Amino acid sequence: MAPEPGRRERLLAALSRTREDLAAACAAAGREPGSVRLIVVTKNFPASDARILIEAGQADLGENRDQEAAAKAAALAEDGLEPTWHFVGRLQRNKARSVAEYADWIHSVDRARLVDALDRAAEARGREVGALLQVSLDGDVSRGGVPVPELTALAERVAASASLRLRGVMAVAPLDWEPLKAFELLAECSQAVRGVDAAATEISAGMSGDFAEAIACGATMVRLGRNVLGERESMT
Ligand SMILES: *Cc1c(COP(=O)(O)O)cnc(C)c1O
């Protein structure tokens, strides 16, 4: 499907504005702009938008639902477009095989049984998948994430797996928390995980509304949707 007229120009303008905003947040935090990776979350937007972004040099894209992500990844791959895919949504074990097919990173690893299912699926495909442990900062696991007291054990499980690479931590700031409080706690969680594997240095934190706070607290990956693509229909 062809994008609507003017879509390319609008997306490219929003992308460069967003990159400038990230650079400003890095400068404010005394960090190098190259130390934060931008992941554009394309959920609820068509493959044609993802294509525009990839062609503009945006290498990292995120999705939060397997069905939509698998279709988008396949459509783009047919045209030889293979961005780095980050799966950032809640994940059921029965989707592990599908996700392990296209995802390069999974940001939502949050329980032992999911670790085992993903490991088997990745191994069967001869792939290595980067794993970030999603932390439930407020302990409300209904929204996904491992409770803080169980984080180290889960990290050890990933570290012992055959085909998942322990890369770090991820969180979404709880709705009623100050973002700084959330991301400071996540930075402590990151230290705990680095105690299991010193190379697991990635911190995936920050969405369109709170990326500056996340960057101030050491985020190495920010996941932005609306800032680049515009408001979504309220499907999620
Ligand atoms: C949708 C989503 C994002 C992006 O959110 P925006 O508010 O659109 O920037 C980031 N992380 C996760 C886990 C998401 O589901």
Image (cartoon, rainbow, N blue to C red):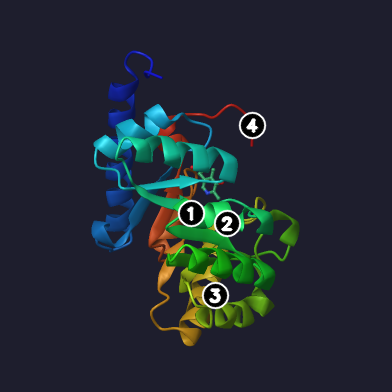
Q: Amino acid at mark 1?
A: Glu
From the viewer's perspective, is the residue at label 3 or at label 4 nearer?
4
Identify the mark nearer the N-term, 2 or 3: 2
Left or right of 18 in this view: 67? right
SS of the residue under disc 3: helix
Q: Amino acid at mark 4?
A: Met
According to the image, label 3 marks what residue?
A: 189
According to the image, label 2 marks what residue?
A: 97
Q: Amino acid at mark 2?
A: Arg
Identify the mark nearer the N-term, 4 or 2: 2
According to the image, label 1 marks what residue?
A: 101
For residue 5, which quarter of the picture? top left
Mark pair 3, 4: CA separation = 31 Å
10 Å crowding of disc 1: few (<14), some (14-19), many (20+)? some
Q: Residue at x 49, y 77 (%)?
A: 162
Residue 100 sits above or below residue 167 on the image: above
Mark 3 touching mark 4, by CB under 8 A?
Answer: no
According to the image, label 4 marks what residue?
A: 235
Ligand 1 is within 8 Å of the C-beta of the residue at disc 1 = no
Q: Amino acid at mark 3?
A: Cys
Q: Residue at x 58, y 50 (%)?
A: 89
Mark 2 touching mark 1, by CB under 8 A?
Answer: yes
